[in-house]
């Protein structure tokens, strides 16, 4: 009478082996502390394998194309970088299905509506990005296992309301600001925040220089206005990030899921979004094909106007959907996703 339990445990073990394989796992096994988080992951997987339902993975991702011309050029909608990520998810689903036929469900939580205003992006642009992303999911024939959700809407659905905690979170952000200013952590936050800011009013070369300057935690003289915007965004994002983690509806909305991340975090499964070794997140760059036809994510400033890269656009769009290296022998074409 124990056979079903044994079979379901064996299936959970096989699925976990796929998820933590180097092709899909971004962080190191010691870094994620697999020994510590393995029992809970197996428990969640086992909940699905016992009932014969698809195992579940959630990931908080794909908020919007960052409004940084050095990173994404003039592109505001998803492009081949996001499409390649969707195809990578499809490969992960296939790998899981090879050891567990019911397969995998991936639940993507878009957090753009929660953080967009911090970086100077309006809600309409976020919604346009999400709608285009959904069309790419359909185009990739992945809508049967990839499901997209709005993080803020999921919070409301499960009554996760941070309003009564905002004053405390803002106070904690100010304390962090004062106590950490000038530390390596603070400088890293400064540089990352600058890279997310809406700097579309500047040419990409100027933005690229500012990104380099930002490594020391400040900007050169003459850029006080931008530096002030970055400082305000740092504190605002500190509050929003706390809201995400303190009022996370995923355990309620997806109690049997493994909650993956795109960052290296102890006790969590971090996953590659495009392919192994490609650490640049799709919304921080543009999609390209290298000289072997492999998908990669690069900064627009490194491929735009380069003689060995050809921009390829979708009919009716003004910005490139993908940059193809000239030596790429494979043909590449997309019909309109609209």
Image (spheres, rainbow, N blue to C red):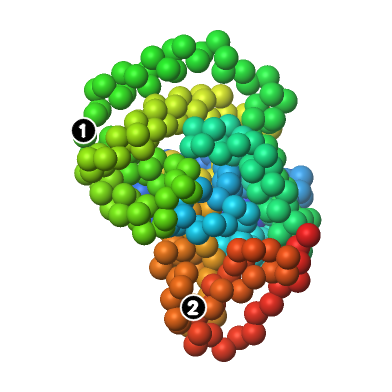
Q: Is residue 314 above or below residue 190?
A: below
Image-quadrant location for residue 110:
top right
Q: What's the residue at 30%, 40% (across, down)?
A: 223
The C terminus - image quarter: bottom right
Q: Dots 2 and 1: beta carbons under 8 Å?
A: no
Residue at disc 1, secondary structure: loop
Q: What's the residue at 42%, 17% (across, down)?
A: 170
Gap between marks 2 and 1, in whole Å?
40 Å
Q: Is residue 175 above or below residue 43?
A: above
Residue nearest the observer in this picture, 34 or 143 = 143
Q: Is residue 122 visible?
A: yes
Few, some or many residues within 10 Å of mark 2 (<14, 14–19, 20+): many
Residue 309 is tagged as: 2
Q: Position of residue 200 (x, y in %)?
A: 48, 49
Residue 182 is tagged as: 1
Which callout, 2 or 1, points at the residue further toward the start of the chain? 1
């Amino acid at each position: 009478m124990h056979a079903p339990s044994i079979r379901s445990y064996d299936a959970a073990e096989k699925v976990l082996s796929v998820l933590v394989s180097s092709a899909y796992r971004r962080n190191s096994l010691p870094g994620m502390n697999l020994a510590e988080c393995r029992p809970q992951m197996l428990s969640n997987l086992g909940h699905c394998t016992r009932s014969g339902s698809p195992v579940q993975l959630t990931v908080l991702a794909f908020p919007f194309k960052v409004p940084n011309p050095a990173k994404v050029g003039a592109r505001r909608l998803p492009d081949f970088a996001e499409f390649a990520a969707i195809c990578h998810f499809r490969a992960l689903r296939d790998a899981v299905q090879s050891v567990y036929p019911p397969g995998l469900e991936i639940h993507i939580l878009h957090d753009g509506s929660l953080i967009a205003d911090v970086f100077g992006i309006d809600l309409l642009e976020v919604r346009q990005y999400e709608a285009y992303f959904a069309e790419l999911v359909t185009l990739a024939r992945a809508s049967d296992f990839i499901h997209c959700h709005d993080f803020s809407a999921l919070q409301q659905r499960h009554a996760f309301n941070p309003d009564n905690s905002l004053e405390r979170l803002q106070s904690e952000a100010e304390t962090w600001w004062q106590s950490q200013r000038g530390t390596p952590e603070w400088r890293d936050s400064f540089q990352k925040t600058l890279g997310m800011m809406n700097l579309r009013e500047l040419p990409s070369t100027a933005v690229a220089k500012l990104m380099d300057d930002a490594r020391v935690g400040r900007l050169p003289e003459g850029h006080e206005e931008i530096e002030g915007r970055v400082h305000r965004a740092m504190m605002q994002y500190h509050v929003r990030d706390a809201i995400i983690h303190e009022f996370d509806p995923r355990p309620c909305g997806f109690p049997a899921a493994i909650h993956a991340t795109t960052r290296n975090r102890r006790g969590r499964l971090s996953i590659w979004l495009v392919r192994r070794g490609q650490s640049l997140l799709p919304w921080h760059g543009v999609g390209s094909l290298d000289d072997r036809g492999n998908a990669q994510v690069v900064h627009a400033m490194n491929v735009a106007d380069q003689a060995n890269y050809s921009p390829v656009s979708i009919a009716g769009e003004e910005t490139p959907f993908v940059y193809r290296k000239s030596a790429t022998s494979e043909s590449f074409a997309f019909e309109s996703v609209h």
